[in-house]
Image (spheres, helix red, strand yellow):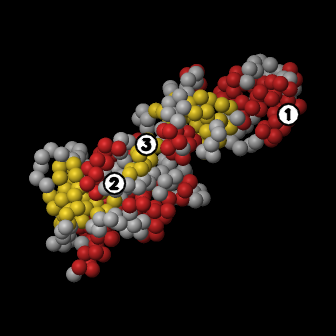
Amino acid sequence: MSRVCIIGAGAAGCFCALLLRRQCPSLQVDVYEAGRRALAKVAITGGGRCNLTNTFQGIRSLKEAYPRGERLVHRAFCQFDHQALMRWFEGEGVKLVVQEDECVFPQSQDAMQIVHTLLHGMERAGVALHLDHRVEAVEHLSDGYQVRFAAGQAPVRADAVVVTTGGSPRAEGLSFLAPLQLDLVTPVPSLFSFNIAGLSEWMGMVADNVSVALAGTKFRAQGALLITHWGMSGPAILKLSSYAARHLAEVGYRAQLVVDWLADVGEEEARSLLADLQQSQPAKQIGNTHLPQVSSRFWQALLHRAGIRAEQRWQEVGRKQLNRLVSVLTADVYAIEGQSRHKEEFVTCGGVSLSNVNSSTLEVKTHPGLYLAGEVLDVDAITGGFNLQAAWSMAYVVAQQIIKGEGDKS
Ligand SMILES: Cc1cc2nc3c(=O)[nH]c(=O)nc-3n(C[C@H](O)[C@H](O)[C@H](O)COP(=O)(O)OP(=O)(O)OC[C@H]3O[C@@H](n4cnc5c(N)ncnc54)[C@H](O)[C@@H]3O)c2cc1C
């Protein structure tokens, strides 16, 4: 009987283990988890509701959702995509709901349902789960692999090893792979908020649709924006932090953020929209007549930023003030002074370089029988269920590959 050793009981590790034992009961499958609980991260995903995937409606190209690793996930999706995943969970009795924004959640709105489904499935299938087993090293021997543990537990031998240890914002988190001499891409955080001073009076304000960009770069994103205690967050900012994760790490999280509060209306059109307002209601106070693209609260705040009093009448607004208002509405510049991951979903940009693996099988090219799946690889996505979908799909690919190899042996 072949023995498969899976390192890390997260989304990818648990799903892979369950598929392996269900589809190939002759395999011995051991999962080694450093922590005291399996699937601890899945339990807190989506604010405890678990946004387990996305319908991908409205995603024009995978690169939009996966700034890193889109080709590899595309291949994995050819074998197991979001629809296959949804069918799989529904087959396990988990009812799912699709939100208006295309994010998919369990109908129970409880991530623990996903956790329990996987854990019960693993138990019934006969997966051996070993908690409190932090792997310290993986070594390739002439006849398989040896896995050693940090807490002095006896090392184990395996015919195949699947590394599913998730993202690690520090390179030390990957040190257990050192004996295998894999190429690593320095890990840096992705999906974070921007620290911007001077916005405390705006706290809690939400703009439904803005376009944000980093000055002097091609990085830009669109969506809702939220003013927080520390600065700016919300989908547009998180997406931009994902696209520019490595660039922002390189510049020490100091950059100029350009906000187009009208989301791509453009300077000329903004000017003509304002001219229309001015002409149609010259005697009205500017603070009481805002553009439909901007909420009344934001309008007041942006007028203040442009140095225009809300009580001023439209007919009193001169060309210079109008120019300032156009510039604040379409290219408002803020200084990013740092990043914040407080209570946020965050993922790792970087990890094991994709050049190490065969992108169709996820087997390490230089170490047959060694596989990688999930966030440990240099694959990560924007928010919306895309990160978990990548983990499920990659886990599926690895499981099928190991099962195929097992079939070829007999
Ligand atoms: C707060 C938060 C909310 C999130 N919400 C969502 C969401 O709603 N939707 C979404 O798609 N994504 C979400 N994500 C991202 C998503 O959780 C991850 O991308 C996904 O869990 C990655 O799966 P994985 O199996 O690769 O790694 P993980 O699920 O992180 O599992 C890795 C496991 O390996 C273990 N491990 C690490 N090193 C070792 C070692 N040396 N020895 C043994 N075990 C080890 C870890 O303890 C962990 O249990 C969220 C992330 C966070 C932080």
Q: Is 361 placed left or right of 322 in the picture?
A: left
Q: Is residue 69 left or right of residue 9?
A: right
Label 1 sits on residue: 275
| First reached walking from the N terminus: tag 1 or tag 2 | 2
Q: How dense is the environment of label 1, judged by Cα within 10 Å: few (below 14), some, or many (20 and up)?
A: few
Q: Which mark is residue 11?
A: 2
Q: Quadrant of the C terminus?
A: bottom left
User: How far apart in space, not on screen, are marks 2 and 3 (Cα)?
Assistant: 21 Å
The residues tagged by marks 1 and 2 sit, at their Cα atoms, a distance apart of: 54 Å
Q: Is mark 2 within 8 Å of ligand 1?
A: yes
Q: Position of residue 36 (x, y in %)?
A: 21, 44
Foreground residue, 252 or 92?
252
Give the structural element (helix, strand or loop) at label 1.
helix
Q: Are marks 1 and 3 in contact (CB under 8 Å)?
A: no
Q: Which residue is mark 3?
A: 188
The three-letter amino acid code for the residue at tag 3 is Val
* Residue located at (23% from left, 79% from top): 409
Viewed as shown, does residue 301 lie left or right of 349? Answer: right
Quadrant of the image occupied by residue 239: top right
Q: In the image, is residue 409 above or below residue 63? A: below
Q: Secondary structure at mark 3?
A: strand
* Mark 2 element type: helix
Instruction: Answer yes or no: is residue 406 visible.
Output: yes
